[in-house]
Amino acid sequence: MPPEGYTTITVSDRLAAKLTRIMVRHDCSSYAEAIKYAADTTLVQEDEITIRELVRLLAERVDGVDESILR
């Protein structure tokens, strides 16, 4: 039984190997830290995707602006 506030998870051997690589590359001391790192990184990338999408939409709008009104 895990301590209160924690959950036990089961991962495949393949995922455990990936988590081990994350532990080594990012100086994590446990699978829990590696999972937290991977989850946090994924969330940041999702935010970046949202920002990229916003930039793309703004660029499309700028391309559609009549430049004569900007002078």
Image: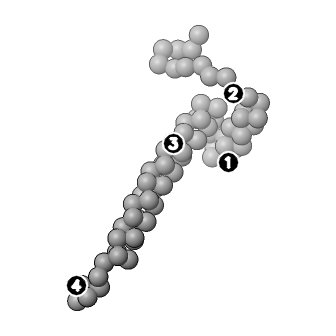
Q: Residue at x 59, y 35 (%)?
A: 35
**C-alpha gap between disc 1 and disc 3:** 15 Å
**C-alpha gap between disc 3 and disc 2:** 18 Å
SS category of the residue bearing label 3: helix
Q: Residue at x 76, y 35 (%)?
A: 14
The numbered mark at residue 69 is 4
SS category of the residue bearing label 4: helix
Amino acid at pointer 1: Arg
Q: Nearer the viewer, mark 3 or mark 4?
A: 4
Which residue lies under the disc numbered 1?
25
Horizontal placement of 59 versus 41: left or right?
left
Q: Nearer the viewer, mark 1 or mark 2?
A: 2
Amino acid at pointer 4: Ile
**Marks 3 and 1: in contact by CB < 8 Å?**
no
Amino acid at pointer 3: Asp
Nearer the observer, 52 or 4: 52
The numbered mark at residue 13 is none
